[in-house]
Image: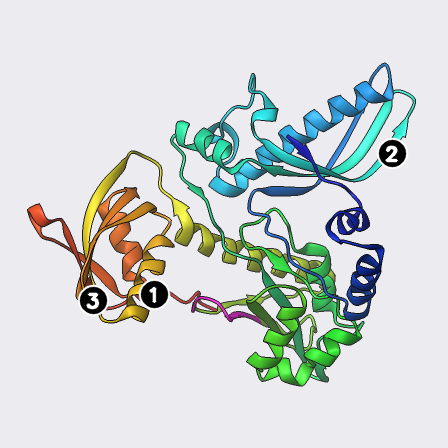
């Protein structure tokens, strides 16, 4: 189990060959305002811990152990969508077997007391082994985080980075890190304004959104467009559409307002519902099924090198496919050996999203054929 240094400057000092390089890098980061998104599929942040003991050292050990266990429970819930009795019991398990590293974000130490906020990164192999042993399906790879752009089209104009954009304020305080639908929320500073203004967002200027995404180290953008004045007698229309990643239908919903409920509460609820819906899409697409594995021989067509590379990437990206091996390769076809979880029917459903189907050829195995792509339902307004 490792310990991640809290100080970014300490890390930069370790990486940079000289003080001059270090100073230049710090100045460059400060000048550009670059914020890089971190991969965090098996990381749980914002874990608050506290403990008392005979001395501060013992209190720290107790608090960190509790926090790591709480974080693992949160991670298991996130990966499986399960709660309560369906979850694996951690009683009697050595938490060190599951922890890859942890970071203390802030701490307070007193006589016999310790309180802190920590983030823990868990060992992916150990966590997956635990879930498989319990017969639970789980999401191995939810995909990279996306930049969430909060545009509000009111009756009086557009709001994006303005301080009075209550929609952005709701996203800032409500978006959860404990979700498979992971987002980076822009700072909304002058540099963001120079890269993407409200008019560009309103017309979904993809080039401008990609420039903004590059600043935050991500490649995908979700434009969360809210339409309506915010008056209690007028519902708001919410549409969230993804750009720069896999094509998927927009999320759409109606935000009902009430004179008995503050606008902030209604907007917070809308953010939570949007993230929950997008998380369910990830779960439907990327859950590794429970149950035994089987090996399939699949004959795949080859049209040209680019189409073959794309097809192989699509197959290897399927949640049901544990591993792939090329057994033979000609100019027209490849014979693949796939280790698959969940059975052929589930694999067929996933392949249909890319317009493929499997035909049983008995002793020869399965042949991959072109078929109509399965339409994805669009949530009703």
Q: Can residue 161 be seen in this view?
A: no
Q: Is residue 155 left or right of residue 368?
A: right
Q: Where is residue 54 in the image (x, y as percent from the top left)?
A: 85, 14
Along the line of sight, the residue nearer the viewer: 13 or 134: 13
Question: Please, what secondary structure does the residue beneath circle 3 have?
Answer: strand
Q: Where is residue 354 in the image (x, y as percent from the top left)?
A: 31, 64
Question: Please, what secondary structure does the residue beneath circle 1 have?
Answer: helix
Q: Is residue 45 above or below residue 20?
A: above
For the residue carrying disc 2, how many other residues have a C-alpha within 10 Å: few (<14), some (14-19), or many (20+)? few
List the residue tagged with mark 1: 310
List the residue tagged with mark 3: 370
Q: Give the range drawn in magenta.
A: 238-248
Q: Position of residue 353 (x, y in %)?
A: 32, 62
Asked where in the image residue 65 lies, by quadrant, the reply is top right
Asked where in the image residue 72 lies, by quadrant, the reply is top right
Q: In this view, does 163 lie above or below 8?
A: below
Q: Is residue 295 above or below residue 111?
A: below
Q: Position of residue 347 (x, y in %)?
A: 27, 50
């Amino acid at each position: 189990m490792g310990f991640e240094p809290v100080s970014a400057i300490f890390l930069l000092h370790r990486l940079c060959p000289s003080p001059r390089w270090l100073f230049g890098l710090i100045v460059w980061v400060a000048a550009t305002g670059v914020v890089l998104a971190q991969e965090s599929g098996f990381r749980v942040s914002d874990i608050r811990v506290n403990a008392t003991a005979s001395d501060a050292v013992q209190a720290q050990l107790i608090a960190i152990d509790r926090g790591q266990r709480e974080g693992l429970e949160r991670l298991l819930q996130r990966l499986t969508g399960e709660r309560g009795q369906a979850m694996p019991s951690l009683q009697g398990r050595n938490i060190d077997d599951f922890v890859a590293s942890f970071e203390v974000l802030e701490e307070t130490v007193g006589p016999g007391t310790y309180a802190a906020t920590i983030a823990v990164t868990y060992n992916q192999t150990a966590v997956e082994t635990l879930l498989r042993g319990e017969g639970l399906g789980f999401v191995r790879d939810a995909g990279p985080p996306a930049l969430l752009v909060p545009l509000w089209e009111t009756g009086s104009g557009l709001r994006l980075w303005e301080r009075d954009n209550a929609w952005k304020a709701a996203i800032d305080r409500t978006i959860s890190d404990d979700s498979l639908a992971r987002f980076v929320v822009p700072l909304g500073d002058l540099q963001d304004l120079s890269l993407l203004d409200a008019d560009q967002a309103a017309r979904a200027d993809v080039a401008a959104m990609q420039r903004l995404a590059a600043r935050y180290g991500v490649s995908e953008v979700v434009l969360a467009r809210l339409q309506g004045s915010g008056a209690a007698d007028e519902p708001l229309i919410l549409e969230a559409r993804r750009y720069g990643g896999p094509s998927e239908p927009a999320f759409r919903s109606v935000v009902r307002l009430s004179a008995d409920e503050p606008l902030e509460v209604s907007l917070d609820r809308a953010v939570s519902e949007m993230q929950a819906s997008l998380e369910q899409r990830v779960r439907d697409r990327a859950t590794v099924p429970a149950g035994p594995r089987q090996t399939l021989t699949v004959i795949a067509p080859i049209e040209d090198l680019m189409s073959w590379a794309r097809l192989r990437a699509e197959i290897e990206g399927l949640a049901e496919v544990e591993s792939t091996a090329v057994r033979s390769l000609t100019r027209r076809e490849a014979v693949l050996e796939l280790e698959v979880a969940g059975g052929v029917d589930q694999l067929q459903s996933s392949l249909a999203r890319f317009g493929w189907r499997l035909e049983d050829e008995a002793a020869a195995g399965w042949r991959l054929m072109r078929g109509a792509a399965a339409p994805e339902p669009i949530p009703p307004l």
